[in-house]
Image: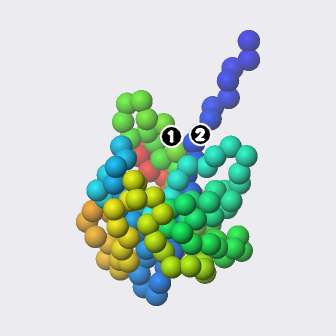
Amino acid sequence: MPRDRFRLPAAVYGVLRGGERVLMLRRAGTDFRSGQLSLPAGHLEGGEDAVAGLLRELREEVGVEAAPGDCRLALLVHSAPEHEGDLEYLHLFFVVERWSGEPVIGEPDKCSELVWVAADALPADVVDCVAGALYAIDRGESLLLRGW
């Protein structure tokens, strides 16, 4: 009997920059890192490519539109499971060069505020893997292995 192939979930993250600042949202009402700051992000759904998933998440979470050509893959993170029963993940971080619309909270049941933070001095309550990824992007890294 053939073995099932290993499957790896993937998540996309949008790094929207305004000068030296980056847009972050405060997670709320979720099981994952509620109360902490993160980027607009989400899991890929079946039948969509990574950029289409990113654009969907940007619309859903912060109400902005971007063109695919304005989204640059900046970092790939391969993370080991964080705890028993967790999965390995691929995290794709895209710098979004331009967008239209003013960012707003699109999912108030999952987000309590939007804030612009200094990209080079992130607050202490940024989700740790997101902070590590942002610093890696600033260093020009393209791959980050986390937890191995």
- Name above or below for residue 85 compared with residue 134: above
Depth check: 25 or 110 in front?
110
Residue 125 sits in quarter: bottom left
Q: Residue 43: x percent and y percent? A: 56, 49
Q: How crowded is mark 1: few (under 14 residues within 10 Å), some or many (20 or more)?
A: some
The color scheme shown is rainbow
Residue beneath the point at 66% across and 76% down: 70
Give residue 8's mark: 2
Residue beneath the point at 71% across and 54% down: 49
Three-letter amino acid code at the position of disc 1: Glu
Res 146 visible: yes
Check disc 1 and report its element: helix, strand or loop: loop
CB under 8 Å between callouts 1 and 2?
yes
Distance between the Cα atoms at labels 1 and 2?
A: 6 Å
Q: Mark 1 points at which residue?
A: 88
Q: Residues within 10 Å of mark 2 (few under 14, many from 20)?
A: few
20 vs 100, left or right, is left
